[in-house]
Image (cartoon, rainbow, N blue to C red):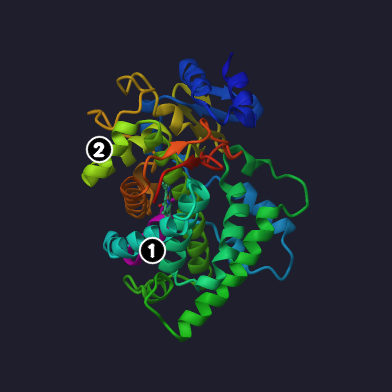
Amino acid sequence: MDTMQALGALLDPASRPDPYPLYARLRDAGPTWVESVSALVVARYADCDALLRDPRLSAERGRDQLKHMARVLPADAPSSVLQPWFLSLDPPDHTRLRRLVSKAFTARSVARMESSIAVLTDELLDAAADRTHMDVVADLAYPLPMTVICRLLGVPMADEPLFRDWSARLTRLIDGFDARMTSDDTMPDWLHASVEMHRYVSGLVDARRSDPGDDLISELLAIRHEGDTLTHDELISTVVLLLVAGHETTVNLIANSVLALLRCPDRLSALRDDPTTAPALVEETLRFDPPVQLTARVVSEDAEICGVPLSRGSFVYLMLAAAHRDPSQFDRPDVFDPDRTDLTHLAFGLGPHFCLGAPLARLEARIALTRFAQRVVDPAASQDPPPYREHLNLRGPRAVPLTHSGI
Ligand code: HEM
């Protein structure tokens, strides 16, 4: 099987329960130009690591898509819909926006949420306590990050269901190859969701402007750095980015890590007795089964990348999940081993675009995992492997059903 065939097989949802043998094919083949997706596919750890910091590669992979969006958007759509996320901007715009947002969304503000995340986790487990079965995704992994991010931003609780709906629809936008396949002149569903969400967030921002509260939107409104501040559109675009980037990814981290624990009962009982083992479990899950499986870059000038001559504008896919199983980087890469001494990963990216929400994702996963281990008695997976979501990029189970003898 060559790279093109392996990629084709990856696009087939049948590969979702275990895409790793296909990733091995991509790694073995080395960096390869694949005509069918018009991109260089890179799957080895050293290459992904180097390219994430390579200034010849641009994060501005959404230009064509923005042009397409501008063409199909209705005239009354909020202008912020066309404001690019800073995730897909290069310096100096990226540097400026990231600096401003980082002043409000700090590791300290995240650490302050620890006790409220623990309370929320317990409430979710309490709600599942009167049954002998639970679904880790529906009962814990899905609602926890949604409520946390909504509370952080100051979204009223009654409106959370709106965000669940928008978030699920908008993830199509960041789902790997799909995002580039929009070429007709109809508005895709994720764009409808985006328009609705921007309208809502714009109203929320206006309300906070006249009546600031103790939430991240109010803090983002108040940021000043050397006379600079976020424009209205930049603020709305950032709030939407935080909601989308901060939700589905963390759902998958929690679900993937609980699944890993269910498969290693000794680790589960060790965690119950010693919560300090949680961070290593979370980090090894991020390596072993990363929630974000790949990312993309665009070549900003004609250049040779991994020995392959590419012209300006060519896409490069960095197959992070494949890199995480690279035997040149990891000893026994296909074994889930939180004690490994070579534990490192690219799950949050690297370099200038390193995930801004990593401290929050880690905190939520650590608390969810620990409270799960301490409270759910004798959990046993009812279906292994569980059913997987169809996404290629955002990897996670649709449900993790289990039985238990008490919560
Ligand atoms: C960037 C993964 C949770 C906000 C990224 C990137 C990755 C990533 C791989 C870099 C993309 C690239 O370089 O192309 C994850 C994973 C998460 C997670 C696996 C959960 C397990 C969060 C959370 C938030 C967040 C909770 C916020 C609430 C962001 C933002 C960026 C980003 C704003 C853009 C940073 C920049 O471009 O400077 N994330 N993320 N993420 N993430 Fe996360």
Residue 164 as seen in the image, left or right of residue 371: right
The residue shown at (67%, 56%) is 191
Residue 379 lies in the magenta stretch: no
Quarter where residue 78 is shown = bottom right
Q: Residues within 10 Å of mark 1 (few under 14, many from 20)?
A: many
**Residue 350 point in image, percent of width and height:** 36, 41
The numbered mark at residue 73 is none
Q: Which residue is more in the foreground, 362 or 95?
A: 362
Secondary structure, mark 2, is helix
Q: Indicate the amino acid at tag 1.
A: Val
Q: Residue at x 71, y 52 (%)?
A: 188
Write down the residue under mark 2: 270
Is residue 16 shown above or below 184?
A: above
Name the mark on residue 101. 1
Q: Say if 170 sits above or below 386 in the image.
A: below
Q: Magenta region: which residues?
A: 89-105
Which is nearer the eye, 354 or 109?
109
Task: Kindly state the secondary structure of the residue where label 1 is placed.
Answer: helix
Going by the numbered disc 2, the residue's amino acid type is Ala
* Mark 1 or mark 2: whose residue is earlier in sequence: 1
Q: Is mark 1 within 8 Å of ligand 1?
A: yes
